[in-house]
Protein backbone atom coordinates (compact mmCIF):
# COMPACT_ATOMS: atom_id res chain seq x y z
CA UNK A 1 0.00 0.00 0.00
CA UNK A 2 1.29 3.41 -0.97
CA UNK A 3 1.18 6.43 1.36
CA UNK A 4 -2.29 8.07 1.30
CA UNK A 5 -0.88 11.55 0.57
CA UNK A 6 0.04 10.61 -2.99
CA UNK A 7 -1.69 10.61 -6.35
CA UNK A 8 -1.21 9.19 -9.83
CA UNK A 9 -0.11 11.70 -12.44
CA UNK A 10 0.94 11.55 -16.09
CA UNK A 11 4.65 12.26 -16.52
CA UNK A 12 5.43 11.88 -20.22
CA UNK A 13 4.94 9.62 -23.20
CA UNK A 14 8.35 8.09 -22.57
CA UNK A 15 7.78 7.36 -18.88
CA UNK A 16 4.00 7.12 -18.57
CA UNK A 17 2.46 7.64 -15.13
CA UNK A 18 4.20 8.39 -11.86
CA UNK A 19 3.30 8.80 -8.20
CA UNK A 20 3.43 12.30 -6.69
CA UNK A 21 3.14 13.63 -3.15
CA UNK A 22 0.03 15.71 -2.46
CA UNK A 23 1.34 16.88 0.94
CA UNK A 24 4.73 16.99 2.61
CA UNK A 25 5.97 13.46 3.35
CA UNK A 26 8.70 13.89 5.97
CA UNK A 27 11.98 12.03 6.10
CA UNK A 28 11.55 8.74 7.96
CA UNK A 29 7.96 8.17 6.81
CA UNK A 30 6.95 4.72 5.61
CA UNK A 31 5.89 5.41 2.03
CA UNK A 32 5.01 1.87 0.98
CA UNK A 33 4.20 -1.27 2.96
CA UNK A 34 3.28 -4.67 1.67
CA UNK A 35 -0.24 -5.26 2.97
CA UNK A 36 -2.59 -8.23 2.77
CA UNK A 37 -4.32 -6.93 -0.36
CA UNK A 38 -1.19 -7.14 -2.51
CA UNK A 39 -1.32 -9.71 -5.30
CA UNK A 40 1.33 -12.43 -4.88
CA UNK A 41 2.34 -14.50 -7.92
CA UNK A 42 4.57 -17.35 -6.84
CA UNK A 43 7.77 -17.80 -8.80
CA UNK A 44 6.69 -21.17 -10.20
CA UNK A 45 3.10 -20.13 -10.92
CA UNK A 46 1.65 -21.21 -14.26
CA UNK A 47 0.42 -17.65 -14.73
CA UNK A 48 4.01 -16.55 -15.44
CA UNK A 49 3.99 -18.79 -18.50
CA UNK A 50 0.88 -17.11 -19.90
CA UNK A 51 2.00 -14.37 -22.33
CA UNK A 52 -1.24 -12.47 -21.72
CA UNK A 53 -0.08 -11.75 -18.16
CA UNK A 54 3.71 -12.00 -18.25
CA UNK A 55 4.37 -8.45 -19.45
CA UNK A 56 1.98 -6.97 -16.89
CA UNK A 57 3.50 -8.91 -14.00
CA UNK A 58 7.09 -8.14 -14.99
CA UNK A 59 6.38 -4.44 -15.58
CA UNK A 60 4.36 -3.64 -12.46
CA UNK A 61 5.70 -5.95 -9.77
CA UNK A 62 8.84 -6.46 -7.71
CA UNK A 63 10.42 -9.72 -6.57
CA UNK A 64 10.48 -10.42 -2.84
CA UNK A 65 13.16 -12.35 -0.89
CA UNK A 66 11.31 -15.62 -1.60
CA UNK A 67 11.49 -14.97 -5.34
CA UNK A 68 7.75 -14.37 -5.70
CA UNK A 69 6.30 -11.45 -7.67
CA UNK A 70 4.42 -8.82 -5.68
CA UNK A 71 1.94 -6.70 -7.63
CA UNK A 72 0.55 -3.69 -5.79
CA UNK A 73 -3.22 -3.39 -5.86
CA UNK A 74 -3.09 0.42 -5.71
CA UNK A 75 -1.08 3.07 -7.59
CA UNK A 76 2.08 2.06 -5.75
CA UNK A 77 2.91 -0.04 -8.80
CA UNK A 78 3.50 3.17 -10.79
CA UNK A 79 6.43 4.43 -8.68
CA UNK A 80 9.27 5.25 -11.08
CA UNK A 81 13.00 4.76 -10.80
CA UNK A 82 15.53 7.44 -9.92
CA UNK A 83 19.27 6.97 -9.45
CA UNK A 84 18.99 9.43 -6.54
CA UNK A 85 15.64 8.25 -5.15
CA UNK A 86 13.71 9.83 -2.31
CA UNK A 87 12.47 6.44 -1.07
CA UNK A 88 14.08 3.04 -0.89
CA UNK A 89 13.32 -0.38 0.49
CA UNK A 90 14.45 -1.22 4.00
CA UNK A 91 15.58 -4.54 5.41
CA UNK A 92 12.20 -4.63 7.15
CA UNK A 93 10.37 -4.82 3.83
CA UNK A 94 8.78 -1.38 3.70
CA UNK A 95 9.87 1.69 1.72
CA UNK A 96 11.01 4.72 3.68
CA UNK A 97 11.40 8.39 2.77
CA UNK A 98 15.15 9.11 2.73
CA UNK A 99 14.52 12.86 2.86
CA UNK A 100 11.54 15.21 2.94
CA UNK A 101 9.34 14.76 -0.13
CA UNK A 102 7.74 18.09 -1.01
CA UNK A 103 4.13 18.50 -2.19
CA UNK A 104 4.07 17.98 -5.95
CA UNK A 105 7.38 16.08 -5.96
CA UNK A 106 7.50 12.68 -7.62
CA UNK A 107 7.98 9.69 -5.34
CA UNK A 108 10.82 7.52 -6.67
CA UNK A 109 12.83 4.47 -5.70
CA UNK A 110 15.80 2.51 -7.07
CA UNK A 111 14.81 -0.34 -9.36
CA UNK A 112 18.20 -1.92 -8.68
CA UNK A 113 16.83 -3.13 -5.34
CA UNK A 114 13.77 -4.86 -6.82
CA UNK A 115 15.51 -8.19 -7.51
CA UNK A 116 15.70 -7.77 -11.27
CA UNK A 117 15.84 -10.86 -13.45
CA UNK A 118 17.59 -8.98 -16.24
CA UNK A 119 18.93 -5.56 -17.20
CA UNK A 120 16.38 -2.83 -17.89
CA UNK A 121 16.94 0.60 -19.48
CA UNK A 122 16.34 3.60 -17.24
CA UNK A 123 14.66 6.93 -17.84
CA UNK A 124 16.03 8.64 -14.76
CA UNK A 125 14.80 11.90 -13.25
CA UNK A 126 18.34 13.03 -12.37
CA UNK A 127 21.56 13.88 -14.17
CA UNK A 128 24.22 11.19 -13.92
CA UNK A 129 21.72 8.39 -14.49
CA UNK A 130 23.27 4.91 -14.57
CA UNK A 131 21.42 4.29 -17.83
CA UNK A 132 20.71 0.65 -17.05
CA UNK A 133 19.52 -1.13 -13.91
CA UNK A 134 21.23 -4.48 -13.43
CA UNK A 135 20.64 -7.50 -11.18
CA UNK A 136 24.09 -6.79 -9.70
CA UNK A 137 22.93 -3.33 -8.52
CA UNK A 138 21.55 -4.92 -5.35
CA UNK A 139 25.03 -5.83 -4.14
CA UNK A 140 26.62 -2.70 -5.57
CA UNK A 141 24.37 -0.22 -3.76
CA UNK A 142 23.12 -2.09 -0.66
CA UNK A 143 25.78 -0.69 1.67
CA UNK A 144 25.15 2.84 0.40
CA UNK A 145 21.43 2.56 1.04
CA UNK A 146 21.94 0.95 4.45
CA UNK A 147 23.59 4.17 5.56
CA UNK A 148 20.70 6.28 4.28
CA UNK A 149 18.04 3.95 5.69
CA UNK A 150 19.57 3.77 9.17
CA UNK A 151 19.68 7.59 9.22
CA UNK A 152 16.05 7.88 8.05
CA UNK A 153 14.91 5.37 10.67
CA UNK A 154 16.02 7.72 13.45
CA UNK A 155 13.04 9.90 12.41
CA UNK A 156 10.53 7.03 12.27
CA UNK A 157 8.62 7.82 15.48
CA UNK A 158 9.09 11.56 15.15
CA UNK A 159 6.74 11.81 12.17
CA UNK A 160 3.20 10.73 11.36
CA UNK A 161 3.00 7.13 10.13
CA UNK A 162 -0.37 6.51 8.46
CA UNK A 163 0.80 3.11 7.17
CA UNK A 164 1.93 1.84 10.57
CA UNK A 165 -1.37 0.02 11.14
CA UNK A 166 -0.58 -2.20 8.17
CA UNK A 167 2.76 -3.45 9.54
CA UNK A 168 2.70 -7.12 10.52
CA UNK A 169 3.58 -7.99 14.11
CA UNK A 170 6.96 -9.56 13.33
CA UNK A 171 8.16 -6.63 11.25
CA UNK A 172 7.12 -4.15 13.92
CA UNK A 173 8.82 -6.18 16.64
CA UNK A 174 12.09 -6.32 14.70
CA UNK A 175 11.93 -2.63 13.86
CA UNK A 176 11.16 -1.57 17.43
CA UNK A 177 13.94 -3.78 18.73
CA UNK A 178 16.44 -1.97 16.55
CA UNK A 179 15.08 1.52 17.28
CA UNK A 180 15.06 0.91 21.04
CA UNK A 181 18.53 -0.62 21.33
CA UNK A 182 20.42 0.36 18.19
CA UNK A 183 21.31 -3.32 17.77
CA UNK A 184 20.24 -6.06 15.34
CA UNK A 185 19.78 -3.72 12.38
CA UNK A 186 18.42 -5.65 9.40
CA UNK A 187 20.27 -4.75 6.22
CA UNK A 188 18.71 -3.94 2.88
CA UNK A 189 20.54 -7.09 1.72
CA UNK A 190 17.95 -9.22 3.54
CA UNK A 191 15.49 -8.32 0.78
CA UNK A 192 17.66 -9.88 -1.92
CA UNK A 193 16.39 -13.03 -3.56
CA UNK A 194 19.05 -15.68 -3.99
CA UNK A 195 18.10 -18.81 -5.90
CA UNK A 196 18.39 -21.82 -3.60
CA UNK A 197 19.37 -19.74 -0.56
CA UNK A 198 18.15 -20.47 2.95
CA UNK A 199 14.89 -18.70 3.96
CA UNK A 200 15.15 -15.24 5.47
CA UNK A 201 14.43 -14.85 9.22
CA UNK A 202 11.02 -13.39 8.32
CA UNK A 203 10.20 -16.39 6.11
CA UNK A 204 11.38 -18.86 8.76
CA UNK A 205 9.14 -17.08 11.30
CA UNK A 206 6.11 -17.39 8.99
CA UNK A 207 6.83 -21.07 8.30
CA UNK A 208 7.25 -21.85 11.99
CA UNK A 209 4.06 -19.95 12.81
CA UNK A 210 2.17 -21.82 10.10
CA UNK A 211 3.37 -25.19 11.40
CA UNK A 212 2.43 -24.18 14.96
CA UNK A 213 -1.09 -23.28 13.87
CA UNK A 214 -1.45 -26.51 11.91
CA UNK A 215 -0.43 -28.57 14.97
CA UNK A 216 -2.99 -26.74 17.12
CA UNK A 217 -5.88 -27.45 14.77
Image: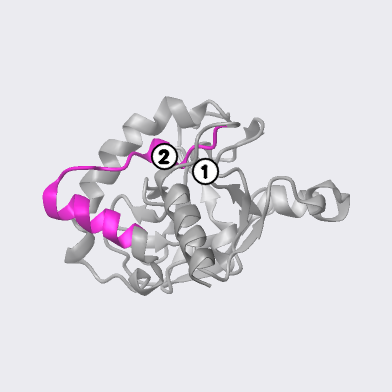
Q: Is residue 179 magenta?
A: yes
Which element is circle 2 on?
Answer: helix
Query: How many numbered discs?
Result: 2
Task: Answer yes or no: is residue 207 visible.
Answer: yes
Residue found 51% across the figure and 71% down from its top? 7
Q: Is residue 31 left or right of residue 78?
A: left
Callout 2–callout 1 Cβ contact below 8 Å: yes
Q: Does 191 sit above or below residue 136? A: below
> What crowding class fits label 2: few (fewer than 14 Cα within 10 Å), some (14-19), or many (20 or more)?
some
Residue found 54% across the figure and 65% down from its top? 214
Q: Is residue 189 magenta?
A: yes
Q: Is residue 175 left or right of residue 60?
A: left
Residues rendered magenta in the picture: 171-194
x and y percentages locating residue 148 in the rendered image:
28, 41
Looking at this rendering, what residue extends furthest in the left direction?
Answer: 181
Residue found 41% across the figure and 48% down from its top? 89
- Observer-nearest of 112 and 176: 176
Which of the numbered marks, if any, corresponds to residue 190? 2
Residue at the spot of label 1: 65
Amino acid sequence: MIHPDTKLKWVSKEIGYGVFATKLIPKGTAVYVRDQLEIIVERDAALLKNPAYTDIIEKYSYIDPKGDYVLSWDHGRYVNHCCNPNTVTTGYGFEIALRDIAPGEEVTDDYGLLNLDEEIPLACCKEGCRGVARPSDFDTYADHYDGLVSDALTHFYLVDQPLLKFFDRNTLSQLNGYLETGNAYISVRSQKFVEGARPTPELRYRNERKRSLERSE
